[in-house]
């Protein structure tokens, strides 16, 4: 399990990337922190989805220190950093592979007619030794996204439709926060998603602390009435 410090750092990184993506001056929709359920009960926790005329961009944020290195087909990538004058290395799952499963889940929802691109962005701007177009530093992200052209441009209507399809499929709580969350407030949506992510990771009911059980596209608490629907 991730330490609370690692989670906090991850969140800070996600907020920073959300700010960068929101500066996109073209017509767009941005969904941050979307939780979807895949076929076999696997949850997909997607950091950012930017929907704009040249496609749907699925973006995974990494807020790691050290110099990042890795190859496309590697299962693990490495980050190298100095501790007291010595080089230390740590590995992490290849985020491009992680993102491929997110993309399959998204294709199931929006269909195959739209161009979907995956990106991995490094908040600390330390990806200089990676040689992929779609794994880059935070400072280059919007520029790279702009460089991609698609044969068929998405209309504003299509952008709205895709945004609606994805939000309709997100996991939600059977509480008022879901109602608020449709009505407006990205803020309450974010708080609800945070609660869902934590519950999914631990399979513990946030209301009473018993175990949550997965059945019929629901994470259900057998003790109280608490439900997370997918
Ligand atoms: Zn409960």
Image (cartoon, rainbow, N blue to C red):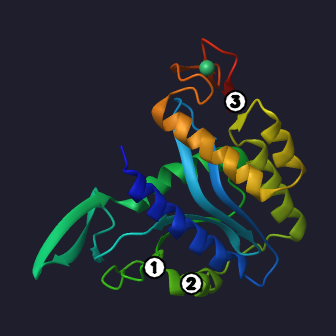
Residue 228 image-quadrant placement: top right
The tag earlier along the polypeptide, 2 or 3, is 2
User: For this view, does 79 lie left or right of residue 96?
Assistant: left
Q: Which residue lies furthest to the top in this view?
A: 223
Q: Do the residues labelled 1 and 2 touch (CB within 8 Å)?
A: yes
Q: Name the residue under label 1.
A: 136
Q: Mark 3 points at which residue?
A: 229
| Disc 3, SS | strand
Q: In this view, does 96 lie above or below 147?
A: above
Query: Which residue lies at the image location 76% right of the left edge and 49% below the top edge?
Result: 167
The tag earlier along the polypeptide, 1 or 2, is 1
Foreground mark, 3 or 1, reads: 3
Query: Which residue lies at the image location 40% right of the left edge and 58% below the top edge?
Result: 5
Residue 185 image-quadrant placement: bottom right
Q: Are marks 3 and 1 in contact (CB under 8 Å)?
A: no
Alpha carbon distance from label 3 to label 1: 34 Å
* Label 1 neighbour load within 10 Å: few <14, some 14-19, many 20+: many
x and y percentages locating residue 79 in the rendered image: 26, 71
């Amino acid at each position: 399990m991730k330490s609370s410090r690692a989670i906090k750092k991850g969140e800070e990184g996600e907020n920073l990337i959300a700010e960068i993506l929101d500066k996109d001056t073209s017509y767009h929709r941005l969904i941050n922190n979307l939780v979807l359920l895949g076929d076999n009960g696997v949850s997909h926790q997607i950091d950012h989805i930017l929907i704009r005329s040249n496609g749907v961009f699925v973006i995974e944020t990494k807020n790691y220190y050290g110099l990042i290195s890795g190859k496309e087909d590697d299962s693990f990538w490495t980050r190298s950093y100095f501790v007291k004058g010595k080089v230390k290395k740590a590995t992490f799952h290849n985020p491009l592979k992680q993102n491929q499963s997110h993309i399959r889940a998204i294709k199931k929802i929006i269909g195959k007619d739209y161009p979907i691109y995956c990106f991995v962005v490094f908040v600390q701007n330390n990806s200089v030794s990676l040689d992929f177009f779609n794994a880059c530093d935070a400072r280059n992200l919007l520029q790279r996204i702009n460089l991609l052209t698609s044969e068929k441009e998405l209309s504003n209507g299509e952008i709205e439709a895709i945004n609606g399809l994805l939000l309709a499929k997100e996991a939600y709580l059977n509480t008022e926060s879901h109602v608020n969350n449709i009505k407006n407030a990205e803020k309450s949506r974010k708080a609800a998603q945070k609660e869902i992510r934590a519950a999914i990771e631990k399979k513990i009911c946030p209301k009473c602390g018993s175990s949550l059980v997965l059945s019929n596209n629901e994470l259900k608490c057998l003790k109280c009435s608490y439900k997370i629907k997918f």
